[in-house]
Amino acid sequence: MHQRETLRTRLIAAAVSTFLLGGCASSGDRYPSLEIRDVERVSGQFASTAGAVQPPAPISQDTVRRLADITASARESHAAFNRATPGARRIVNSAASAAVTSDRWASAQVALGDLDSKRSLTAVSLGDLDILFANAAIDLAARPEISEARAEVARMVADEDVVLAELRQRLRR
C-alpha cells in the first residue's frame, strides 16, 4: 500500500510540475523587441569648440615664490646629504665586515638613518612640487617652470637613492 501512495504522489508531482512549467513557455509576441527604439537613437550635433580653447594662464606670483622656496629647500637638503655622505661611507665601510651586534654596525645604521632623514627632506620638496603642479593644472595655468623644478628635484632624490642603496648593499656583505 505504501508503494502505491509513493507512486501516486510522484505522478501527481510530475503532473503539477508539467502544468506549472508549461505556463512558462509561451509565444514570443508577448515580450518587447530588443531592437533599438526611436527614443534610444542618437540625434543632433555637438558644436565645435575649436575656437573656444584658451591658452593656459601664467602661474601666479605666489606660486613662483613658493616654487623658488621649495627648490631652494631641496637644494639645501641635497647639499646636506652630499656633505654627510663621505662620513657615512667611511662608517659603513668600517662596519662592512663587522657583526650585526657590534658597535661599528650600530654606528653604520645611525649614519644611514641620518642620510635617510636628509633624503626625506628632499623628497618632501618633491611632494610639495607635485602639489604645486596639481594646483596649477586645476587652475588651468602653465606648468613648465614647475615641471623643470620637479625634474631637478626628482634627479636629486634619485641620486640620493643610489647612494643609500650602495651603502646598504655594502653592509649586507
Image (cartoon, helix red, strand yellow):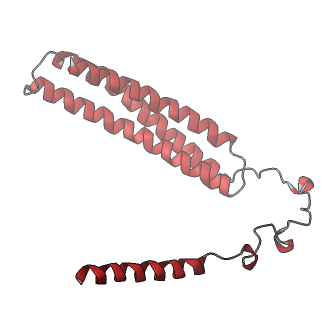
Judge left or right: residue 36 versus residue 107.
right
Q: The C terminus is located in which quarter?
A: top left
Judge left or right: residue 71 versus residue 172.
right
Relative to residue 150, is residue 55 depicted above or below? below
Q: Position of residue 24 (x, y in %)?
A: 59, 77
Relative to residue 102, is residue 118 depicted above or below? below
Q: Residue at x 32, y 35 (%)?
A: 116
Judge left or right: residue 30 versus residue 168.
right
Q: Residue at x 40, y 41 (%)?
A: 121
Judge left or right: residue 116 versus residue 12.
left
Looking at the picture, tell me which residue is in the foreground, 85 or 19: 19
Relative to residue 76, is residue 131 depicted above or below? below
Q: Position of residue 154 (x, y in %)?
A: 51, 34
Q: Residue at x 42, y 36 (%)?
A: 77
Q: Position of residue 103 (x, y in %)?
A: 9, 26
Q: Residue at x 69, y 54 (%)?
A: 60
Looking at the picture, tell me which residue is in the foreground, 120 or 79: 120
Relative to residue 106, is residue 130 depicted above or below? below
